[in-house]
Image (spheres, rainbow, N blue to C red):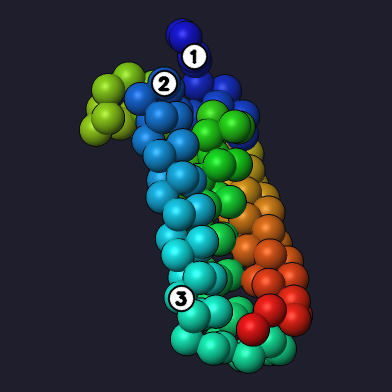
Amino acid sequence: MQLEYVAGACNIGPEEIARRTRAAYAGLVATVLLAVALLVLGAPSGLGPRLLIALPLTGAAIGWIQARRRFCMAYGLAGTFNLGKIGEMSRVTDQRALAADRRTALIIAGQGLLVGLIGALIFALLPLN
């Protein structure tokens, strides 16, 4: 798969996409393990310790969104992109492109946070004990 940099739309290549996908799966596994641990430890339903799953769930969601969109949130904020091997970074010099990348990065952050919070609220309010 040959990709090219497109401001606000694509700033990572196949190796970086695979890396984000692995991070998403790791975040999902961490979410499930934390949820199981909270249930085994008897964390009550309601707005309390069960909301902790928002952290790994947000990470999983951000990883998945980045992989699907072929866009790294951190690179977008930093004004960089990487379409080659991991570690081979290039700088975004055009100010319009930089603004588009930062806007996309903030959208991804917001989407991931929303998924994490909604998932945590659902888990927190389920009557599982």
- In the displayed structure, does residue 25 sit left or right of residue 100? left
Q: Amino acid at mark 1?
A: Leu
CA distance for labels 2 and 3: 35 Å
In this view, 84 is above or below 60: above
Q: Residues within 10 Å of mark 2 (few under 14, many from 20)?
A: some
Nearer mark to the viewer, of 1 and 2:
2
Q: Amino acid at mark 2?
A: Pro
Q: Which quadrant would residue 92 be assigned to in this image? A: top left
Q: Residue at x 56, y 88 (%)?
A: 43
Who is closer to the viewer here, 54 or 90? 54
Mark 2 highlights which residue? 14
Q: Determine whether the residue tagged by mark 1 lies in a helix, strand or loop.
A: loop
CA distance for labels 3 and 1: 41 Å
Q: Residues within 10 Å of mark 3 (few under 14, many from 20)?
A: few
Mark 3 highlights which residue? 37
In this view, 119 is above or below 100: below
Q: Residue at x 74, y 76 (%)?
A: 126
Please state the horizontal and vertical placement of residue 111, each as a whole percent of the image. Answer: 68, 54
Q: Residue at x 48, y 46 (%)?
A: 24
CA distance for labels 1 and 2: 8 Å
Mark 1 highlights which residue? 3
Q: Determine whether the residue tagged by mark 2 lies in a helix, strand or loop.
A: helix
Q: Determine whether the residue tagged by mark 3 lies in a helix, strand or loop.
A: helix
Q: Residue at x 68, y 58 (%)?
A: 115
Query: Badges 1 and 2: C-beta atoms under 8 Å apart?
Result: yes
- In the displayed structure, does residue 105 sit left or right of residue 30? right
